Image (tube, rainbow, N blue to C red):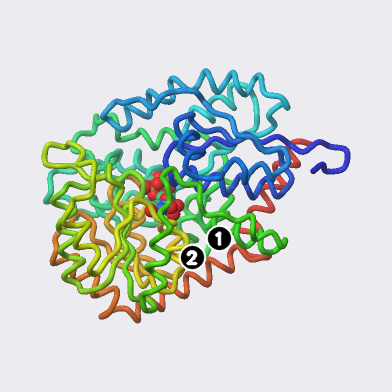
């Protein structure tokens, strides 16, 4: 689509390798394609191979004029240390990406790089192309990462052992009264030594651009967005992206183009048939996202807690997500669990999550608090029990329970009695209060992506600003 005689700007979009990043960013790419931009969507090659193997993504996007996928041909570094892996990936990818941008035809006019891929923004600055970082994490977790240098300057880190975990961190503006050490991003900021190389890793990546796109909405994170605005003059809050895209496609009569599936695993749709035969709001959906690893012991605590709660459950267990005491992969879901699962639950390796959450049989979600999962749960009006694993998830789960009152936080505990109690609290004893607050937030999420809603207005502003930049 051309705007008068001016050719449509060519936007290059590059997400990080995780499932949540790919999901959210593809939805943004689709919204920008609908606005008439030419899009080149870049994935690491090993991500694209899995995406193509498990979905119809290429056929789906071929319907958008001027849309193309390109890949960065690097292998996934095998360093056991996460930040080291990311560092190596950046070092290998940066020159390849830079060459790709320089040689691109048509010329690249604008770059949207994932907030955790700082090198994408560096390349844009080096070549002199306008760029912005897209954050697939919540505003509250962004702000926590952003504020870590102030926390350190105030000597509120390091954490001095387990007994120190409930100490308040008072140097993240807007969170002075409820953010504890245990709510800081695990794997990055919960350090026992201030010289830990992980401490500033994400902070350094996310602080690169002058403006931000965040997959959130004003009505959910207004107070923290106000804090972020003290440091950034341009923030585009355009989420929940999946709901936004769905609404947009419906408004132009192209709802059949919507597909939730940008999955890196093969989706097992049989669970929908199973859900069809369950009573309304009777099932707890259990999924810990794309990169959580649990020990066999933890898995069994969840299993007993779920069975003892006497509630039905649909549980996603990626086979590679379970390890034994030596840290080796079990490779398969334990036999007794698969067998027992038939009685009161249904176990799959990967589910069509958006459809599952929207199903009338679902009454609650036991989640790792990944940001996409959290937004999908909010948009479906499903209350949550949070068991965060790492990174942004620790902050998200604190907000879900303490600020938004959309569920319970089981952080740092994995005990069958606690699982059983929380499941019963969510599904029975305190159900009314959670259903009320989630229904309210669901309504606000829907409004935000409606025609004059806050997220729609922000997306329109982003589209307009990109066009103005290229006039
Ligand atoms: C991590 C971070 O925690 C998250 O906040 C960040 O935005 C991305 O990286 P991840 O484990 O990928 O997250 O979780 P999440 O953000 O919740 O994304 C998982 C996605 O996979 C969701 O969109 C969910 O719908 C999808 N999913 C999950 C499925 O389609 N099927 C499943 O069985 C499980």
Residue 346 placement: quadrant = bottom left
Q: What secondary structure is found at the residue carrying circle 1?
A: helix
- Asked if the residue under mark 2 is in contact with the one under mark 1, i.e. CB atoms within 8 Å, the reply is yes
Q: Can residue 206 be seen in this view?
A: no
Determine whether, in the image, residue 308 is placed left or right of residue 448: left
The disc, 1 or 2, on the residue closer to the chain's N-terminal end is 1
Residue 421 placement: quadrant = bottom left
Return the x and y of residue 2 as percentages of the image width and height.
Answer: 82, 41
On residue 407, the disc is none
Residue under circle 1? 243
Category of crowding for the residue at label 1, using alpha-carbon neighbours closer than 10 angstroms: few (below 14), some (14–19), many (at least 20)? many
Determine whether, in the image, residue 422 is placed left or right of residue 391: left
Residue at x-position 44% and y-position 25%: 90
On residue 379, the disc is 2
Residue at x-position 27% and y-position 56%: 387
Residue at x-position 36% and y-position 55%: 396
Return the x and y of residue 214 as percentages of the image width and height.
Answer: 52, 49
Q: Can residue 343 be seen in this view?
A: yes
> From the image, which quarter does the N terminus lie in?
top right
Residue 450 placement: quadrant = bottom right
Category of crowding for the residue at label 2, using alpha-carbon neighbours closer than 10 angstroms: few (below 14), some (14–19), many (at least 20)? many
Q: What secondary structure is found at the residue carrying circle 2?
A: helix
Return the x and y of residue 87 as percentages of the image width and height.
Answer: 38, 26
Return the x and y of residue 389 as percentages of the image width and height.
Answer: 28, 49
376 or 342, which is in the foreground?
342
CA distance for labels 1 and 2: 7 Å
The answer to whether the beta carbon of the residue marked 1 is less than 8 Å from any atom of ligand 1 is no
Residue at x-position 62% and y-position 22%: 127
Which residue is the extreme one toward the right? 5
Determine whether, in the image, residue 210 is placed left or right of residue 221: right
């Amino acid at each position: 689509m051309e705007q008068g005689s001016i050719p449509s700007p060519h936007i290059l979009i590059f997400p990080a390798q995780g499932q949540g990043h790919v999901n959210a960013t593809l939805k943004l790419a689709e919204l920008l394609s609908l606005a008439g931009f030419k899009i080149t969507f870049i994935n690491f090659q090993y991500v694209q191979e899995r995406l193509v193997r498990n979905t119809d993504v290429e056929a789906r996007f071929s319907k958008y004029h001027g849309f193309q996928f390109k890949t960065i041909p690097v292998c996934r570094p095998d360093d056991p240390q996460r930040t080291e892996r990311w560092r190596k990936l950046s070092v290998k990818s940066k020159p390849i990406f830079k060459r790709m941008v320089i040689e691109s035809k048509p010329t690249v006019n604008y770059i949207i790089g994932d907030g955790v891929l700082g090198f994408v923004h560096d390349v844009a600055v080096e070549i002199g192309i306008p760029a912005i970082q897209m954050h697939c994490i919540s505003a509250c977790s962004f702000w926590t990462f952003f504020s870590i240098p102030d926390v350190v300057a105030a000597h509120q880190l390091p954490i001095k052992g387990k007994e120190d975990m409930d100490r308040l961190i008072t140097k993240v503006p807007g969170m002075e009264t409820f953010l504890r050490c245990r709510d800081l991003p695990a794997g990055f900021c919960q350090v026992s030594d201030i010289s830990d190389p992980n401490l500033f890793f994400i902070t350094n990546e996310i602080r690169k651009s002058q403006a931000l796109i965040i997959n959130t909405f004003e009505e959910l994170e207004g107070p923290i967005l106000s804090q972020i605005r003290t440091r950034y003059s341009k923030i585009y809050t355009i989420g929940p992206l999946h709901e936004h895209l769905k609404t947009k496609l419906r408004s132009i009569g192209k709802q059949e183009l919507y597909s939730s599936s940008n999955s890196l695993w093969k989706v097992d749709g049989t669970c929908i048939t199973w859900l069809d035969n369950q009573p309304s709001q009777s099932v707890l959906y259990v999924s810990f996202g794309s990169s959580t690893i649990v020990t066999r012991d933890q898995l069994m605590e969840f299993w007993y807690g779920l069975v003892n709660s006497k509630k039905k459950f649909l549980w996603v267990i990626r086979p590679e997500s379970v390890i034994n005491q030596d840290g080796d992969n079990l490779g398969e879901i334990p036999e007794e669990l698969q067998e027992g699962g038939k009685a009161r639950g249904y176990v799959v390796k990967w589910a069509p999550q958006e459809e599952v959450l929207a199903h009338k049989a679902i009454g609650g979600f036991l989640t790792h608090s990944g940001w996409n999962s959290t937004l999908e749960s909010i948009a479906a009006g499903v209350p949550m029990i949070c068991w965060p694993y790492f990174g942004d998830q620790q902050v998200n789960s604190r907000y879900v329970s303490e600020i938004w009152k959309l569920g319970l936080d089981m952080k740092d505990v994995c005990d069958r009695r606690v699982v059983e109690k929380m499941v019963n609290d969510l599904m029975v004893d305190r159900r009314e209060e959670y259903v009320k607050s989630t229904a309210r937030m669901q309504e606000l999420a829907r409004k935000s992506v409606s025609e004059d809603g806050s997220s729609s207005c922000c997306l329109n502003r982003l589209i307009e600003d990109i066009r103005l930049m290229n006039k």
